[in-house]
Amino acid sequence: MKFTLSWLKEHLETDATLEQIVEKLTDIGLEVDGVDDRASFKAFTIAKVLTAVQHPDADKLRVLSVDAGDGKPLQIVCGAPNARAGMVGVLGRPGDYVPGLDVTLSVGKIRGVESFGMMCSERELELSEEHDGIIDLPADAPVGTSYASYMGIDDPIIEIGLTPNRADCAGIHGIARDLAAAGLGTLKGDKIEAIKGTGETPVKVVLDQPADKPFCNGFALRLVKGVKNTASPLWLQQRLKAIGLRPINALVDITNYVTFDYGRPLHVFDAAKVKGNLTVRAARDGETILALDQREYKLSPDMYVIADDNGAESIAGIMGGEHSGCDENTTDVLIESALWDAITIARTGRQLGIVTDARYRFERGVDPEFMVSGLEYATGLVMDLCGGTPTETEVVGYQPYAPREITFPVAEVKRLTNLDVEYAEAAQILTGLGFGVSGDGKAVMVVKVPSWRGDVEGKADLVEEVMRIHGLNEIEPQPLENMGSVNGKILTTLQIRTRMARRMLASRGMMEAVTYSFIPEAHAKAFGGGKPELKLANPIAADMSDMRPSLLPGLLVAAQRNADRGFADLALFEVSGTYEGDKPEDQRRVAGGIRRGTAGVEGSGRLWSGNAPAVGVYDAKADALAALEAAGAPVDRIQIEAGAPEWFHPGRSGTMKLGPKVVLGYFGEFHPDTLELLDVSGALCGFEVFIDAIPEPKKKATCTKPSLVLSQFQSVKRDFAFVVDSDVEAGSLIRAVMSADKKLISNAQVFDIFAGASLGENKKSVAIEVLLQPLDRTLTEEDLEGVAKKIIEAVAKQTGGVLRG
């Protein structure tokens, strides 16, 4: 946001210097990005050409004798075609810096003739692109005085960086209001007088939009007849040029001026080019419009336009159309001031790639109460600069602003900022900013939020207003309170588990990836998502429309991108959030990973001793268990069941549980249909474990490791082979064996599986090695027989298995 010092002082009556204003702007949160004091123009003076003779050795050069006002004529060699005796121009002397040429002048010889400076063109002073000749001033221009002062271009330019919430300061009047509230002057021009029109506006406005979700919240229109659209006056052109805008004509320049003056974007239509009435409607699919930037845009039904009987005449709230634009032939002008939906404006501007001053303000929110006042202000400027007779204002669809009321205990300022601000001072600050204040005069006030402060919604926002005007520099630094001992726990359990899972997966040769939380709708639905409440209202790209329900689609797509570039064997992981709903409790902390090609734990690729095998379900299972163990899950009690969600291969996947209800994660190879949908190929397996589903430890957290308990008695191994139904899982056999004697049996593992006709139809034999570890005595033969009996009974009871004969 740029403005000049004199422009600011049209809204702020103040004696403050430029330095004081710049310092105060930053103090109140309107951070100054830069100041141009226009010092580069101050050296140039107005000079008169006394004589102009032909250069002796150059046909296109003249030797000038120039009077700079000090009675000592200077010799200047000049090549401008308009250089002549008697003209008044702009002189640069040796030592002066010329910004348009990026050179510092010095005494030099041009074709053998000395030159003590130069006569400047507008482009050389960066005033315009005009370079056909040197600047030609009126004959009565005061010779010897500053050219910058004479033309009014010595006005300092201030640029501030606005945060998105401060839409009220996208106009110079709003900036002046803040400065006045901070004690730097008095606000001027707060009320705009209405201009009485003659007769009704002949062009009517129709709002064709859903009643429950309007795009246009108000539309004001007025016709001004008999205008003369010439070049705007010099003062207006200079102000627009100073902030980087190119003057076009008086009518267009007025709309740009009001946009920056009061933060109110407007648009003007040449009334003679508008056919019929104006309709605010959704664009038709495939409809096109040639905009004022000479580019043709293809529109879609989620965009809105202002149309007449000819079709779309303007991209609503963003840019007007070329067909109805105003030019030097315009005699009747329609001035439009409207309120547009901020989200739709932002989405349309992003889709079309259009960035305009109007879009910038509408997508942040403009003052609804200034809609009609802005039209009145623009009408007055049109009448002053172009003449004409206005009609009455046509207003459609606008509902008067109802101020939001906030109950504000002044003690909140102390609680949130540690600033001691009295009730009276807080009331004065808020009143100065335009808030309505009433209350008991002691502790609590009721604050009415003005129409231009749509960002103020609660008590904390009011505290921020009081704090920044009272002075951020008044907040004294306070040391952080000592919350505990050095060895006290700092991170939460979830944070610790997240870090440990990340370290474990990295130690297994996997590379960490950071993927987008937004994925295409088709990918979200393929992984159990795609809920309406998880769809983004304003996605940053068309293929990032939904919040991810899983980490796996992003990792799979990332792996394919790497494979397309020649890195086929890789393992990726991510520890981040997934989303099952739009509430805080619906966000999960998940560790997920995938392996592709031959990227196993032990390495990948081709070796002389044999190629590494392709990754499979057991690689994913090992990764998942390692992540859970690192995160503190009791892996010795985890139950693994066959089957997983539909995006995994139904016969090569599993689910990890802790009891019948707590699901800790899934692993396996991916379903071919899922890979085809994601346009991913290759040998792929993956896993997801839910870190936030791991139960909290029951014991008090400690950094001390438990004592090492070693038995001095000999361990014993015994082998059992059980015949069970073919659908009985090995894991259920292991659990049955371990439950037979939890004190004596320290481990059990499957070492052989056999199936054959000799066992019977749909039968299999599972051989299990059981490790017995006594702690208090050496086992006897009777002890071993007793344990074996318990194991056989437990297996028979829990799985129906019998000891193989």
Image: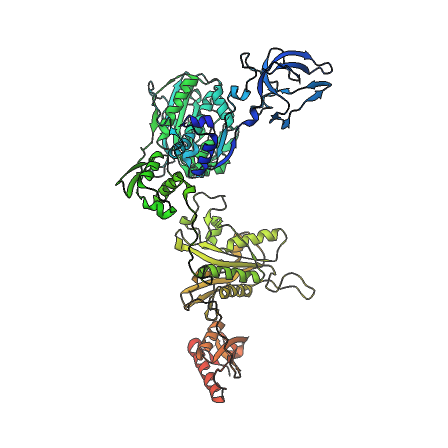
Q: Which quadrant of the structure image shows residue 434?
A: top left
Which color scheme did the rendering employ for the protein?
rainbow
Which quadrant holds residue 77? top right
Q: Is residue 253 left or right of residue 422?
A: right
**Where 313 falls versus 343 (above or below)?**
above
Q: Is residue 242 above or below residue 58?
A: below
The residue under the point 43% across, 44% down is: 537
Whether residue 327 can be seen here? no
Q: Residue furthest front?
A: 71
Expressed as whole percent of the image width and height from the top left, the position of residue 270 reads 44, 21
Residue 231 percent location from the top left of the image: 49, 19
* Residue 216 horizontal side relative to residue 158, left or right: left
Towards the viewer: 234 or 775: 234
Where is residue 53 shown, x and y percent of the image? 68, 11
- Can residue 45 be seen in this snapshot? yes
Residue 566 horizontal side relative to residue 535, left or right = right
